Image (spheres, rainbow, N blue to C red):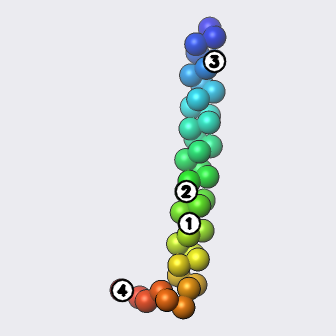
Amino acid sequence: LYQELGESRSEVENADYERKKIDDLRKRISDAESSPHHLEL
């Protein structure tokens, strides 16, 4: 039982980490797009 709880907790932490990573990526992309150095390719 304890092992199952540990696994589900790490899955939740994993999903949380993925969400933060995606949020950070989106922020970086929007920062880059609003940067004067950004050129349309």
Split into 4 quadrants, where in the image is the N terminus?
top right
Residue name at image x 57 percent, y 75 percent: 30
Disc 2 target residue: 22
Q: Are marks 1 and 4 in contact (CB under 8 Å)?
A: no
Split into 4 quadrants, where in the image is the C terminus?
bottom left
Name which of mark 2 and mark 3 comes first in the sequence.
3
Q: Are marks 4 and 3 in contact (CB under 8 Å)?
A: no
Q: Are marks 2 and 3 in contact (CB under 8 Å)?
A: no
> Around disc 2, counting alpha carbons within 10 Å, would you say few (fewer than 14), some (14 to 19), or many (20 or more)?
few
Instruction: Reply above or below: 31 against 20.
Output: below
* Residue 11 on image: x %, y %: 57, 31
Dot label at residue 5: 3
Name which of mark 1 and mark 4 comes first in the sequence.
1
Q: Are marks 1 and 2 in contact (CB under 8 Å)?
A: yes
Dot label at residue 26: 1
Please name the amino acid that badge 1 sits on.
Arg
Tell me the CA gap for discs 1 and 4: 18 Å
Residue name at image x 55 percent, y 56 percent: 22
Residue name at image x 60 percent, y 25 percent: 8
